[in-house]
Image (cartoon, rainbow, N blue to C red):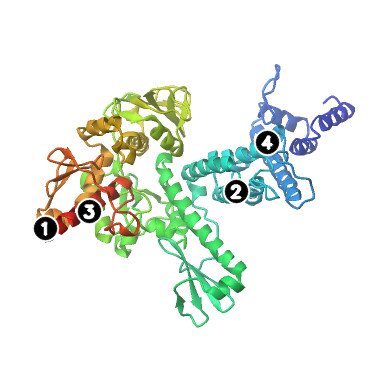
Amino acid sequence: MAGPETEQALVTRLRTVHADSPLRLAEIEVILTTGPRERAVLAEDQWSGPLSGDWPPLTDPVAERTADALHAELARHVLRSAAAHLAALHAGELPYAADQAFTTADADTLRRAARLALRRDEPWAGQVFSTLLPQLAVAPTAAKTLPSQRACIALAQVVEAWPTPESVAALREARRVVRHAGVTKKLDRLLRRAERNLGRRPEAALRLPDLGLGPDGSRRLPCADHTAVLTVTDEATLTWERADGRALKSLPAAARRDHPDHVTAARDLLGKARAQIRTLTRALEGGYLAGAVHRYDRWRDALATHPVARGTAGRLIWEVEHAPGDWRAFLPAAGPADHPAPAPDPSAAVRLWHPARATPAERDLWRDRIADLRLHQPFRQAYREHYRAPESGHSTTMFQGHLVRIEAVLGLAGRQGWNIDDDILALPLDGFTAWLGIAGSLYPGAAGWAEVGEVTLRRADGSPQALAEMDAVRLSEVLRSVDLLISAGSFAWCDTHAHGPEGRRHLNRLYAQPLGRTAQLRRAALRRILADHLASGRMELDDRHLRLDGHDIHLATGRVTRSGDPVEITLPTGRQAVPLPFLPYDEALLERVVRTVAHLMEREGSAAHS
């Protein structure tokens, strides 16, 4: 607005100031192609910081759409410029120095561009991230450094907050190639959260990358006289065949020796398939907190019949809305007879079944069905803990007074998405935040025992969120997360509990506590796993214990006593371990209880034989 001469002088000055910041220079070049109104939109939208002074806000209703389109172009230009800069660095065209590829200003620019691209789910973003993130994570030399640690972590944090299947795959590849130990730990944490947060974007979560699998869920990869066969059912497997189609028990030595590139390509494809299944599983489970609902036709094409996803989706219980409020549950793996009839409308809503929405009879029905079919669900669903707060206000005391080990709680809290905020654990979610009070000083590395306080919900604006107004599933999932934290610090089995007087006193205190929801589900699972032994009368399940031949196994701690005295149980490990029967879900303490039962039965049997 001041005229071309003033603009040219300013641009010259900016280019001088930001001569060492290629991404800031890229921003300047894009802004130079815009007019006064577009530049005002850029300033008002705080892309480059807040607008100071008394400028009135733009009132044009088209301004917001203009800003989005302009920022998308700016983000594309910035990200592609960064990718080109890194490509030149890795090609040896530019000298390499650790953490010098981008300045602090560049990293901030890169973070803003990445956030906008992923928030809008731009179609070009996946390809850019697939090259940008892995190149940011590893030096072009053999050094254990990075071109820019600040920029790498900044992009990974953006993927955590606004994940897409493509950006999560890029983050996983970055984690695979990184050599820096400290960055490896950070990327591990961010990757787990990104996979879980993908469930909050249901439409994006179902967009699985194409692996070239056929309708039968397999792909054949020729390797001279042999063929690698990738097959995806419940899990992904890689097998090898001779030229005549005969199966081999393992990778042929000739293929490993003469065609290592083909073998590597086949194994990489297997890794990608397994990673897709893992990401999809975490995204679907994360959809509980997001309240994810899908269109039936989209669900059918992206999950039920997709060669990679159908093995995962088929072992989960789903609900389809046949009429407003009329939700009917079905289990695809049970066979065609269990599919919804008549066929739902393509636009009908589909969601995952959750025990918080079911009656006790329905929960028992599905648990028995899962046990009868011997289905191992991708995550705990039929046996999922569910909660309903007794209060109707904005906080509940249902966990108050529990004593927990702080280091165990904080270790799990980070993986579950909780943050430390002024000595309180906070779980930020769409529209509200859950707060968990703990009577202790919280910081990374804190240790010791502390007492649990209230769980409080607040809306995004800071006002109280009434528990009674919360969706039953979302509230149950928040309370389940709290219970998992408490279980990690008190109820879950930990070998260190058996050592030292403090641990002994803690176990004795837990021994007298009533069972929590997790232990109640463990009891329900054991009732089905050990049904034959219970029917024979040799075993007995009461409210808190599994009783076997005079031994009492506590269902919440795994502690074994006989006539009130503790019994030390050393379970065989490795090849000496007793084979496990079918378990409906994975849990360390459930597995320990079952192994303890088998060990005691074998020991009593040997004694009787002697």
Q: Where is residue 502 in the image (x, y as percent from the top left)?
A: 29, 29
State the residue position of label 1.
608
| Disc nearer the start of the sequence (4/2) | 4
Q: In which quarter of the image is residue 161?
A: top right
State the residue position of label 3.
599
Answer whether labels 4 and 2 touch (C-beta < 8 Å): no
Q: Which residue is rendered at x = 63% and y = 42% of the image?
A: 117
Q: Position of residue 325 (x, y in %)?
A: 32, 44
The disc placed on residue 174 is 2
Label 1 – label 3 distance at C-alpha: 14 Å
User: Is 459 placed left or right of 142 in the picture?
Assistant: left
Name which residue type carries label 2. Ala
Label 4 – label 2 distance at C-alpha: 17 Å
Label 4 – label 3 distance at C-alpha: 57 Å
| Disc nearer the start of the sequence (2/1) | 2
| Disc nearer the start of the sequence (3/2) | 2
* Mark 3 element type: helix
* Mark 1 element type: helix
Q: Which residue is rendered at x = 71% and y = 36% of the image?
A: 106
